[in-house]
């Protein structure tokens, strides 16, 4: 049993050490094309370039870090305030739109379900013609299209 455990332990250690110490090779084939790989070809001369590429694409310059810092800078207090105001305005506009939608639906329901008449400022009532009623219905449907999403 100890031999099996020792074998597994040695296998894991040898596998992990080969994964960490990977080599990268560069070679040119007979047609002049440049190739890269983790194993050199058997028939061509290959250069081990592992040490040359370890720190590729790692920028430690101060100017580049400053640029990145500006791009990903935290919000200032004024930016937060403006963002909050914008959110408030959007919320109020959304609320007003919902109220307008609900009111238009209620008015449309009344117009479609029953005979309709108008009472003027003097208290005199008169029936609404079919043409006037159709115009009112069309106006409420337009309000619904505009405000009910």
Image (tube, grey):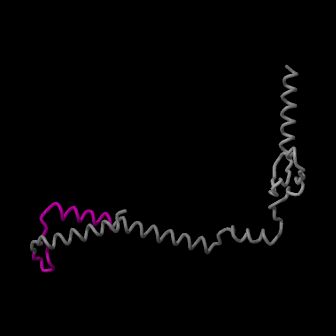
Asked if residue 111 lies in the magenta stretch, the reply is yes
Task: Locate the C terminus by quadrant.
Answer: bottom left
| Left or right for 83, reference 15 | left
List x then y, in percent, for residue 22.
85, 46
Seen from this angle, which residue lies furthest bottom?
122
Task: Locate the N terminus by quadrant.
Answer: top right
| Left or right for 100, reference 62 | left
Q: Which residue occupies the foreground of this view, 49 or 117?
A: 49
| Vertical arrangement, residue 111 with respect to residue 22, above or below | below
Asked if residue 66 lies in the magenta stretch, the reply is no
Seen from this angle, which residue lies furthest top?
1
| Left or right for 102, reference 11 | left
List x then y, in percent, for residue 144.
30, 66
Q: Which residue occupies the foreground of this view, 18 or 83?
A: 18
List x then y, in percent, for residue 55.
85, 58
Seen from this angle, which residue lies furthest front?
31
The span picked out in magenta is 100-124
| Vertical arrangement, residue 82 with respect to residue 33, above or below | below
Q: Quadrant of residue 133?
A: bottom left
Residue drawn at x 85%, y 57% is 53
Residue drawn at x 20%, y 71% is 136
Q: Quadrant of residue 5?
A: top right
């Amino acid at each position: 049993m100890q031999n099996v455990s020792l074998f597994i332990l040695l296998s894991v250690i040898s596998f992990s050490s080969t994964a960490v110490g990977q080599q990268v090779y560069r070679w040119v084939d007979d047609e002049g094309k440049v190739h890269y790989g983790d194993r050199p070809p058997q028939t061509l001369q290959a250069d081990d370039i592992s040490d040359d590429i370890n720190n590729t694409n790692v920028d430690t310059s101060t100017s580049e870090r400053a640029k990145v810092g500006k791009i990903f800078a935290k919000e200032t207090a004024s930016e937060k305030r403006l963002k909050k105001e914008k959110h408030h305005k959007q919320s109020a506009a959304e609320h007003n739109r919902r109220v307008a939608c609900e009111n238009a639906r209620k008015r449309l329901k009344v117009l479609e379900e029953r005979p309709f008449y108008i009472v003027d400022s003097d208290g005199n009532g008169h029936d609404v013609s079919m043409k006037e009623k159709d115009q009112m219905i069309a106006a409420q449907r337009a309000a619904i299209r505009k405000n009910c999403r």
